[in-house]
C-alpha cells in the first residue's frame, strides 16, 4: 500500500528497496510474498495508474521529455559527436522506465548471458536467466489468422512463460510494408527467425511487446507486479521521496547498511532496515547513491567533501580511469534513415494530429526487428579492420577490460550473435531540423550498434542529492564503434533500394543524398544526428573486485554485508537486446537469492 512519510518511518523494515522502477517493484513484490517480512519501497516519482500516455500501447514513448515522469538527464558534451549533449531519459514514478519505454521484450543470444558466468559469476548463465525471464512473463497467444498470415510462432513452453505478472503480446496491427521488410531483408541475407527468444536472436523477427493485446494496455512493473498485491500489509510504498544516502553502522566490518535517509518536500527523514538495503535506482542513480553514501573512488568522493567509507573505484565505471578505454558505462547508439514512400501504404503520418483510429492505438508502433550478424553489414576487409582496431585496444587495456574485449571479438566473429539492429517504423521518425511535408507518407528505419567498445562513466557532480549526476557515455571514443554504426546505417539504406521495400520508395529524405555520398559523409551524419537507445548499464558491474567490479554474484556490494544492487547497472557488458526483459529476470533471480539467504 502507498503510505505517507510518518507512517513509513514508523516501521522497522526487513528490506528497503530504493527505487520503485522496473526491477525495484518486481523485487519488492516477490520479497513480500513472505508475510513474515516487511518490505519498504522509496520512489522519487508518483503513480498515475489511469494515465493514457502510460497505458495505451500506441502512445508509448510520449512521456519522454515530460519532467513530471522523466528525470530528463543529459550527457556532458560528447567530443566524438561534434560536442552534442545527448538526451538520457529515465522513468520517474512507480514502474520507472517500464512505464515510458517503447515496450520491446527482446532477448540477447545465449552466449552473451553465458558470458556473465565466464566473467566470474557462478549461476548467471543463459539457462538460469531464461527460467527467470519465463517466471516474469505471461504470453498472450495471437489469433490464428495472425499466426497464419505473419508466420508467427505459437507460444513454446521451452522459451516462454505462461503465468508470470508481465503480459507479453505480438502486435495486433501490421503495417502494409511489414511483409516487404521481411522479404527485403531475406534478399540481403538476413533470414526470418520464427522465435528470436530461444537463445539465437539473429534474423528478422516479430518480437513480443510488454502489453496485453486482449485489453490493449501496457504491462509494466507497477500494474503487473505491484497493483495486484497493493493491499498487502507488509509491502509499504512511499512515493514523492528522494533518497539522499544510505545509512551504515560504521563500526562493523564488513560495512552494514542500517537504512536510508530521504527527503520528502523540505523535510529529511530516516527509515531503518533490519536485514538489507537494496539499490534499484538504475544505471545512473545507483552509482550516484553509492557515491553520496561514501562508497566509490576515494579521489572522486574527496573532491565533493564526502567521507570515504569504502574505496571502491568500480562505482560508476569499471576501473579507475587510466585511459579513455577503461570506463564501464555502456549504451546503444542509434541513427535513423527516412524515406518518402508511395501513398498507397498506410503509415502513422496519415493520422498525425487527428484522433487516432483504435487499431493504431491498441498496438505498439514497432515490433518487427532485424538483428544482424557482423557479416550481414560488413565485408571481409571491414571486419579485418575492426579486429585490428580491437587487437590494438586490447593490448593497451587493463586485464579486466581485456577479458571483455576478447569476448566481444568472439561474438563479432560468431554469425549467431547480433552486432547490429534495424527496426522499421511506419512513419516519419522525428529528427532535429527535419519536418514532414503535407500529405506525404514516410517509412523510417532505426539502425543500432549492439556491442560498443567505448566505455563511459557516471559520477556525482555535487554532494547535493538533488543535483543530477555527471553522465559521460564517451560515445564513439573507439573508432571501431563508428565503423559498425556506419555499416548498419548503410545496410538500412541498401534495404530501401532493394526488392519490395525499394519498390515502395519515392525519395530518400534522411540522410540526404549528399550526406550519404561516402562513408565519411555518413559518419558526419551519424555524429550530427545519432542518439541513445536508452539502454545504459554496467555502472555497478557484477565482477570480481580486482576486475573493477562493484557487486558479486550474490549482488552484494563488495565490502558490505547487506547492501545489494538489483538493476541493469550490474550487467558488465552490453547485450544485443532491449534490456527490459533482462532486468525483470535480474529482479526475479535476485528475489530467489535473497529468499535463500533468509
Image: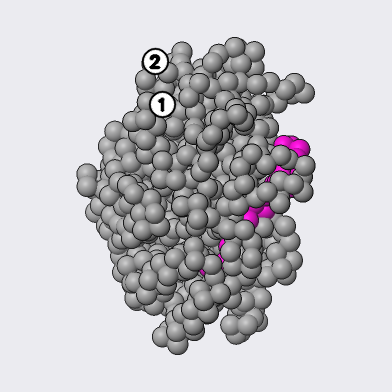
Task: Give the secondary structure at mark 2.
Answer: loop
| Foreground residue among 176 and 299 | 299
Image position of 325 (left or right of 416): right
Q: Main secondary structure of the magenta part?
A: loop
Rendered residue at 41%/85% (across/down): 380
Q: The magenta stretch spans which residues?
A: 453-471
- Judging by the rendered image, the residue that carries numbered circle 2 is 36
Of the two numbered discs 1 and 2 on the same chain, state the one appearing first in sequence.
1
| Foreground residue among 76 and 121 | 121
Residue 303 at x, y percent in the picture: 77, 48
Residue 31 bears which disc, if any? Answer: 1
Q: Name the quadrant containing residue 8.
A: top right
Indicate yes or no whether the magenta region holds residue 457: yes
Residue 167 at x, y percent in the picture: 37, 37
Residue 353 at x, y percent in the picture: 63, 47
Is residue 207 positioned above or below 79 on the image? above
Q: Seen from this angle, which residue lies furthest left?
A: 157
Image position of 350 (left or right of 553): right
Q: Name the quadrant containing residue 259.
A: top right
Is residue 445 positioned above or below 214 on the image? below
Indicate yes or no whether the magenta region holds residue 314: no
Q: Where's the C terminus, which quadrant?
A: top left
Rendered residue at 72%/22% (across/down): 268
Amino acid at each position: 500500500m502507498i503510505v505517507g512519510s510518518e507512517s513509513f518511518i514508523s516501521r522497522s523494515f526487513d528490506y528497503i528497496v530504493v527505487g520503485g522502477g522496473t526491477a525495484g517493484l518486481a523485487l519488492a513484490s516477490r520479497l513480500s510474498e513472505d508475510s513474515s517480512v516487511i518490505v519498504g519501497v522509496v520512489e522519487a516519482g508518483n503513480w498515475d495508474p489511469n494515465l493514457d500516455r502510460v497505458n495505451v500501447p500506441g502512445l508509448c514513448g510520449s512521456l519522454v521529455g515530460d519532467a513530471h515522469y522523466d528525470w530528463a538527464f543529459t550527457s556532458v558534451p560528447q567530443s566524438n559527436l561534434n560536442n552534442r549533449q545527448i538526451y538520457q531519459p529515465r522513468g520517474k514514478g512507480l514502474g520507472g522506465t517500464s512505464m515510458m519505454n517503447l515496450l520491446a521484450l527482446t532477448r540477447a543470444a545465449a552466449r552473451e548471458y553465458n558470458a556473465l558466468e565466464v566473467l566470474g559469476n557462478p549461476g548467471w548463465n543463459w539457462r538460469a536467466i531464461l527460467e527467470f525471464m519465463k517466471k516474469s512473463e505471461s504470453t498472450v497467444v495471437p489469433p490464428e489468422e495472425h499466426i497464419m498470415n505473419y508466420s508467427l510462432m505459437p507460444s513454446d513452453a521451452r522459451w516462454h512463460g505462461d503465468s508470470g505478472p508481465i503480459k507479453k503480446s505480438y502486435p495486433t496491427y501490421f503495417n502494409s510494408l511489414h511483409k516487404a521488410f521481411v522479404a527485403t531483408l531475406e534478399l540481403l541475407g538476413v533470414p526470418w527467425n520464427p522465435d528470436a527468444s530461444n537463445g539465437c536472436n539473429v534474423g528478422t523477427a516479430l518480437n513480443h511487446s510488454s502489453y496485453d493485446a486482449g485489453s490493449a494496455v501496457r504491462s509494466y512493473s507497477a500494474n503487473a507486479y505491484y497493483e495486484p498485491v497493493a493491499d498487502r500489509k507488509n509491502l509499504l510504498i512511499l512515493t514523492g521521496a528522494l533518497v539522499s544516502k544510505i545509512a551504515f553502522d560504521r563500526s562493523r566490518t564488513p560495512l552494514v547498511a542500517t537504512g536510508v535517509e530521504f527527503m520528502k518536500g523540505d523535510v529529511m527523514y530516516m527509515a531503518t532496515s533490519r536485514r538489507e538495503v537494496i539499490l534499484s535506482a538504475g544505471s545512473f542513480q545507483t552509482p550516484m547513491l553509492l557515491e553520496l553514501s561514501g562508497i566509490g573512488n576515494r579521489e572522486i568522493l574527496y573532491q565533493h567533501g564526502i567521507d570515504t567509507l569504502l574505496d571502491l573505484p568500480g562505482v560508476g565505471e569499471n576501473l579507475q580511469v587510466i585511459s579513455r578505454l577503461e570506463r564501464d558505462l555502456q549504451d546503444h547508439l542509434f541513427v535513423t534513415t527516412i524515406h518518402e514512400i508511395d501513398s498507397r501504404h498506410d503509415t502513422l503520418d496519415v493520422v498525425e494530429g487527428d484522433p487516432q483510429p483504435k487499431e493504431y492505438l491498441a498496438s505498439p508502433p514497432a515490433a518487427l526487428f532485424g538483428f544482424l550478424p557482423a557479416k550481414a553489414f560488413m565485408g571481409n576487409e571491414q571486419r579485418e579492420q575492426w579486429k585490428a582496431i580491437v587487437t590494438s585496444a586490447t593490448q593497451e587495456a587493463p586485464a579486466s577490460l581485456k577479458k571483455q574485449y576478447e569476448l566481444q571479438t568472439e561474438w563479432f566473429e560468431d554469425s549467431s550473435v547480433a552486432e547490429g539492429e534495424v527496426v522499421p517504423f511506419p512513419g516519419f521518425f522525428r529528427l532535429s531540423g527535419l519536418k514532414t511535408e503535407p500529405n506525404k507518407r514516410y517509412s523510417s528505419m532505426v539502425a543500432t550498434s549492439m556491442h560498443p567498445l567505448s566505455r563511459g562513466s557516471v559520477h556525482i557532480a555535487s554532494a547535493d542529492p538533488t543535483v543530477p549526476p555527471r553522465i559521460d557515455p564517451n560515445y564513439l571514443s573507439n573508432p571501431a564503434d563508428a565503423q559498425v554504426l556506419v555499416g548498419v546505417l548503410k545496410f538500412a539504406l541498401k534495404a530501401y533500394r532493394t526488392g519490395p521495400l525499394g519498390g515502395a520508395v519515392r525519395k530518400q529524405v534522411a540522410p540526404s543524398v549528399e550526406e550519404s555520398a561516402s562513408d565519411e559523409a555518413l559518419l558526419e551524419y551519424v555524429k550530427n544526428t545519432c542518439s541513445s537507445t536508452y539502454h545504459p548499464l554496467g555502472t555497478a558491474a557484477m565482477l570480481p573486485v580486482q576486475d573493477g567490479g562493484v557487486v558479486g554474484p550474490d549482488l552484494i556490494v563488495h565490502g558490505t554485508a547487506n547492501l545489494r544492487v538489483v538493476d541493469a547497472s550490474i550487467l558488465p557488458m552490453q547485450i544485443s537486446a532491449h534490456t527490459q526483459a533482462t532486468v525483470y529476470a535480474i529482479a526475479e533471480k535476485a528475489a530467489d537469492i535473497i529468499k535463500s539467504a533468509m
